[in-house]
């Protein structure tokens, strides 16, 4: 009940026009993708709230959707196994740390992962055990520093290089040597 209330209380809008928790999705295609996963989730799991397109005043320019929250999710469901890249929360019950790690790693993807804990031992174990390219402790999985490498493991990665960091900067930089006299 607390999580449902928290999700419903999130504010949605254009971040250039106010202080909101969530902004729009990037494209119509991504909105359609997220809505298709919400429809899949409604068939697979228990839908608690959200997943609705927002229209009307304040939402004319952009692709807005309310966060969708699902429970009774199993490891075999598409909303648990695929990268959605939208505000869809699939809650999977676990029986302790080892079960949580096993379930989190039981996917072909590994872009990013996070843990919320006050126990430094769990934080360090999680960082070691989780199969993800970026690990955050007591932080959200969004946002990365330009000087820190960013990229996933497994099918979440191009395997070519990590975006950002030294390798990413070198990839996006064209080196030119210029000599000047006088």
Image: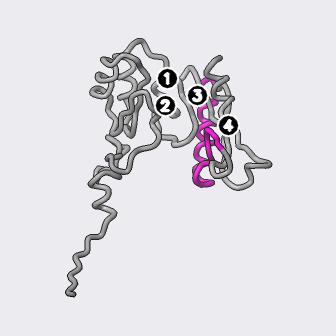
Residue 100 is covered by the magenta coloring: no
- What whole-number distance in Å separates the C-alpha atoms at marks 3 and 2? 10 Å
Q: Are marks 1 and 4 in contact (CB under 8 Å)?
A: no
Determine the main secondary structure of the stretch shown in magenta.
Answer: helix
First in residue order: circle 3 vs circle 2: 3
Disc sitting over residue 44 in the figure: 3
Q: According to the image, label 2 marks what residue? A: 80
Q: Are marks 2 and 4 in contact (CB under 8 Å)?
A: no
Percent position of residue 63, x then y:
66, 50
In this view, which residue lies farthest toward the right?
Answer: 57
First in residue order: circle 1 vs circle 3: 3
Magenta range is 19-46
Figure check: 16 above or below 88: below
User: Residue 2 lies in what quarter of the image?
Assistant: top right
First in residue order: circle 4 vs circle 3: 4
- Of the 4 image quadrants, the one containing the C terminus is bottom left
Q: According to the image, label 1 marks what residue? A: 74
First in residue order: circle 1 vs circle 4: 4
Figure check: 89 above or below 158: above
Counting other residues with Cα less than 10 Å from the Cα at mark 2, is it few (<14), some (14-19), or many (20 or more)?
Answer: many
């Amino acid at each position: 009940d607390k999580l449902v209330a928290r999700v419903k209380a999130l504010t949605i809008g254009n971040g250039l026009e106010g202080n909101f928790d969530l902004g729009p999705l990037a494209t119509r295609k991504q909105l359609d993708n997220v809505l298709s996963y919400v429809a899949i989730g409604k068939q697979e799991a228990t839908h608690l709230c959200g997943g609705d397109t927002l229209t009307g005043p304040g939402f004319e320019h952009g692709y807005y959707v309310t966060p969708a929250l699902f429970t009774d999710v199993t490891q075999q469901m598409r909303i648990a196994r695929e990268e959605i890249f939208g505000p869809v929360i699939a809650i999977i019950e676990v029986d302790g740390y080892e079960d949580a790690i096993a379930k989190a790693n039981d996917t072909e993807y590994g872009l990013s992962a996070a843990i919320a804990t006050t126990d430094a031992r769990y934080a360090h174990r999680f960082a070691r055990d989780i199969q993800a390219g970026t690990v955050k402790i007591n932080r959200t999985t969004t946002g990365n520093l330009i000087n820190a490498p960013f990229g996933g493991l497994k099918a979440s990665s191009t395997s070519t290089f990590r975006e950002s960091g030294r390798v990413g900067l070198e990839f996006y930089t064209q080196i030119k040597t210029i000599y000047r006299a006088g």
